[in-house]
């Protein structure tokens, strides 16, 4: 797995999960498997959108939230890696502490960074839920 830490190698979902598992993080942070937004189909490696990619993650967040609130703990922060077209990862942060959702994308377009483009596919998918 660690051979993939070389320049030009693709990080996969397992490597991201391993890094999250061994990293030092506050007690109120939860994390899980990455969510793919696209899937391959056909013999020419075509890609198509997955209709409801965050459905499973929503259930997981609800189960963590319910279990922790039953014990009277503090609001949680959830980290959800997002896989775009099997070629790029971003991070979705669901933060109950400040009641916000953040999406971190190292290759976001200038119009998204500058605020002139208000909507992205991830934003639309999160707003649906």
Image (cartoon, rainbow, N blue to C red):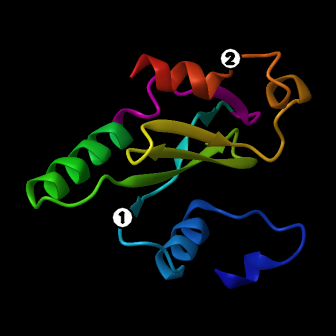
Residue 31, how many percent across, how many down? 43, 60
Residue lying farthest left? 70
23 horizontally vs 45: left or right? left
- Give coordinates of residue 86: x percent, y percent: 69, 46
> Is residue 107 in the magenta section?
no
Check residue 129 in the rendering and tell me which mark sits there, or answer none: none
At x 56%, y 42%, the residue is: 36
Give percent across and percent down for residue 29.
41, 63
Locate residue 63 relative to residue 52 in the image: left or right: left
Q: Residues within 10 Å of mark 1 (few under 14, many from 20)?
A: some
Please tell me whether residue 52 belongs to the stretch shown in magenta: yes
Q: Is residue 62 left or right of residue 72?
A: right
In the rendered image, the vertical position of residue 87 relative to residue 114, given as above or below: below
Earlier along the polypeptide chain: callout 1 or callout 2? 1
Residue at horizontal 47 percent and vertical 32 percent from the top: 53
Q: Which-is-in-front pick, marks 1 and 2?
A: 1
* Quadrant of the image containing the N terminus: bottom right
Between 43 and 100, the one lying in front of the other is 100
Left or right, residue 56 beside residue 47: left
Distance from label 1 to label 2 (Cα)?
Answer: 29 Å
Residue underneath mark 2: 119
Residue span colored magenta: 43-55
Query: At which x and y percent is residue 72?
Result: 13, 58
Residue 89 versus residue 56 in the image, above or below? below
Q: Residue at x 79, y 16 (%)?
A: 117
Of residue 79 and residue 115, the one placed in the foreground of this image is: 115
Which part of the image, by quadrant, shows the C terminus? Answer: top left
Image position of 35 with respect to 48: above or below: below
Q: Residues within 10 Å of mark 2 (few under 14, many from 20)?
A: few
Considering only vertical position in the picture, is 12 above or below 111? below
User: Which label is found at residue 28?
Assistant: 1
Determine the secondary structure under disc 1. loop
């Amino acid at each position: 797995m660690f051979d993939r830490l070389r320049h030009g190698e693709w990080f996969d979902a397992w490597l991201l999960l391993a890094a999250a598992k061994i990293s030092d993080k506050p007690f109120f942070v939860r994390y899980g498997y990455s969510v793919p937004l696209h899937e391959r189909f056909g013999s020419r490696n075509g890609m198509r959108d997955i209709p409801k990619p965050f459905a499973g993650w929503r259930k997981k967040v609800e189960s963590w939230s319910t279990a922790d609130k039953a014990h009277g703990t503090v609001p949680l922060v959830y980290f959800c890696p997002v896989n775009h077209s099997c070629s790029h990862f971003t991070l979705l942060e669901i933060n109950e502490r400040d009641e916000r959702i953040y999406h971190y994308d190292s290759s976001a377009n200038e119009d998204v960074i500058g605020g002139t483009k208000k909507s992205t596919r991830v934003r639309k998918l999160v707003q649906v839920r």
